[in-house]
Image (tube, rainbow, N blue to C red):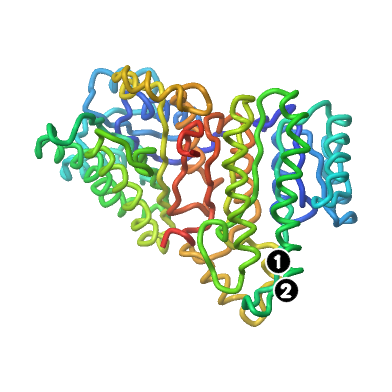
Amino acid sequence: MDRMKGRVALITGAARGIGAATARRFVEEGALVLLTDLLDAEGEALARSLGANARYLHHDVTRAEDWARATETVTTAFGGLNVLVNNAGILAAQTPIEQTEESDFRRVMDVNVVSVFLGMKAAAPAMKASGPGAIINLSSVAGIIGTANTAAYTASKFAVRGLTKSLAMELAEFGIRVNSVHPGYVDTKMIADMIPAEHAEAFRSSASPLGRLARPIEIANMVLFLASEESSYATGSEFIVDGGFTCH
Amino acid sequence: MGKLDNKVAIVTGGSRGLGEATVRLFAREGAKVLLTDVLDVEGEALAAALGANVRFMHHDVSKEAEWQSVVAAAESAFGLVSVLVNNAGIAQSGPMETLSESEYSRVIAINQTGVFLGMKSVLASMRRTGGGSIINVSSIYGLRGSPQTIAYTASKFAVAGMTKAAAMELAPDRIRVNSIHPGFFATPMALGNQAVVDTVLPLVPAGRLGDPDEIAQMALLLASDDMKYATGAEFVVDGGFTTY
């Protein structure tokens, strides 16, 4: 129960879903965690339930000034920054390209990609000063393969994968490892909102060769491994946890 | 409480290097381990040092009959098998025009056919267990091309491909199959070729060779119940070597 003992982490989109499961696992393993999100009521409640080693901060990941406040808050509260988990993201409406508004495409790129750039830029100075560290960027199976009617989401998740590799090369000399995690369909509100209720059961059983959705903790366990020293030689790589979705 | 309590694992090539580190970590995490190898002296000594939950058996992974004996031995000593680490492998280097067909075939027999036979042989045991995790040790040579390693590269790409085919075939049985792709590690295989070490070390973004325990940790994660949704995927641990 001390795989992250004394490590300081910042997790975006931590109020629910994969982010919440990750925050919970990190705290269980001894980390000090700043959870950030736009969903203040859920984020504050979760941080409170996790005890003194967790705090919550309102954070719009598309705004550089919010990132400055988040890194300032985490270093002040916990004395440094070792781990950044860029988890916040949105799923665009699934529409053919003719019906995809330019403004929607730009919005997805802003929330899913520019946020990751701003996050790594804001966190780099504090992380370099804190010694060896890890950045984990949540991409998706949509960052590995193509699917129809998801131009913006797919472009954004491939971009996260590329950003990860560039920063892995740039930050290696500082002992900061940068990897991407690629979940398949996870049992979260983001996915539930995407599927009409009458199709939910069929969707679940066909979501992967394993015949089910992932549980958020199954993705959180991958993020935990990459954040901990257990993965001390892994950087610049893609970690797929998708029940076999992309292997065929 | 260990991450592999009550699990029975077979680790091939377990006498030294990445296999030895994996055997040590699995045993520390509560697994019962049958380690196999053709290096009997090292294997026997390791098993003796690790106590009653670790046993050694001589094993040429390219021989199907030996695989049947190994699985039977694991079952009778420890019970139904739930983890298989296909780690045994041999290196090959040199220009292709000097590589004989028999040398080529030997690399394929051990590195590739050995993995097929391992998956095939352990299947019935894992089905009766109600699921399992097969971890095939490929390589960064299973992802990229490099000169003077044609047989090794062929065998390691094959391991990555067989992993995906087996993952699809065995998903209904809840048997997960994944490949690990180590970069350059401080093992007898890598250190046996100083010229390669001297050439590649400056090219590793992490600035060092990997420690075998860093592969053992990856294998542990995939073997454990923490990763029950991962199958058919490639897990690269290479200090950034294939990032660029």
Mark 1 is surrounded, within 10 Å at the Cα level, by few (under 14), some (14 to 19) or many (20 or more) other residues, namely: some
**Is residue B70 or residue A110 the one in the foreground?**
A110
Tell me the quarter of the image containing the C terminus of chain A: bottom left
**Is residue B159 or residue B9 the one in the foreground?**
B159
For image coordinates 90% across by 56% down, the residue present is A41
Residue A244, horizontal then vertical, whole percent: 46, 59
Identity, as a three-letter code, of the amino acid under mark 2: Glu
Tell me the quarter of the image containing the N terminus of chain A: top right
In this picture, residue B228 sits left or right of residue B122: right
| As drawn, B14 above or below A161 | above
Mark 2 is surrounded, within 10 Å at the Cα level, by few (under 14), some (14 to 19) or many (20 or more) other residues, namely: few
- Exactly how many numbered labels are in the figure? 2
Residue B80, horizontal then vertical, whole percent: 36, 46
Q: Which mark is residue A101?
A: 2
Residue at the disc numbered 1:
A105
Give the letter of the chain under mark 2: A
Q: Quadrant of residue A207?
A: bottom right
Residue A160, horizontal then vertical, whole percent: 63, 50
For image coordinates 89% across by 54% down, the residue present is A40
Q: Quadrant of residue B182?
A: top left
In this picture, residue A94 sits left or right of residue A80: left
